[in-house]
Image: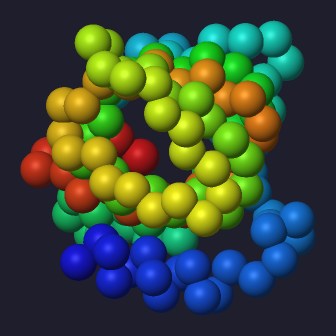
Amino acid sequence: MSTQLLTHYVHSIGDVDALELEPWELPTGEWGVTVTGENVEYAGRFLYLSEDKLLAVGIERLGPSLLTGVHAGETLYFLRGSVLCKPPGGEPYRLKAGDFCYFPPGVEDVWEIEETYVKLFAIHSEVPLPF
């Protein structure tokens, strides 16, 4: 379901530089995610939120920083940027523009955002999302 929604929105994004995103507050531990850094740009916009708040689709932009957290069950498509991912006990890997991936609920990661990313996301949760 979320892959089909993302595909629909990927086709309707248009010019990534022209996206109108709202400033968002940096996560500081809510939902198991923390972002740290100096003067970090963080913005986004929800494109869809189900009535039961179990499914959300949106666009997010995050500048160079360190993101530590636990995934909630997310499908992601990176439109721009570069992220060095460091899973605990695993080999580091890089996500960049054009990459499409899925993180099941409970997967831990540390992301070093090397270059501001813009990503399209779909979160499918078993419990209502807090947005």
Where does the image place residue 52, in percent across and percent down from the top left?
A: 21, 63
Looking at the image, residue 67 lies above or below residue 97:
above
Front residue (pair 64, 42) = 64
Measuring 63% from the left and 50% from the top, which residue is drawn there? 96
Looking at the image, residue 65 lies above or below residue 106:
above
Determine the residue located farthest toward the left in the rendered image: 126
Front residue (pair 114, 35) = 114
Front residue (pair 34, 118) = 118
Residue 33 can be seen, yes or no? no
Measuring 31% from the left and 20% from the top, which residue is drawn there? 90
> Left of 104 or right of it: where is 61?
right
Residue 69 can be seen, yes or no? yes
> Left of 101 or right of it: where is 79?
right
> Left of 122 or right of it: where is 40?
right
> Left of 68 or right of it: where is 97?
right
Determine the residue located farthest toward the front in the rendered image: 91
Q: Quadrant of the N terminus?
A: bottom left
Front residue (pair 101, 93) = 93
Measuring 88% from the left and 70% from the top, which residue is drawn there? 18
Looking at the image, residue 126 lies above or below residue 18:
above
**Quarter of the view holding residue 36:** top right
Looking at the image, residue 131 lies above or below residue 110:
below
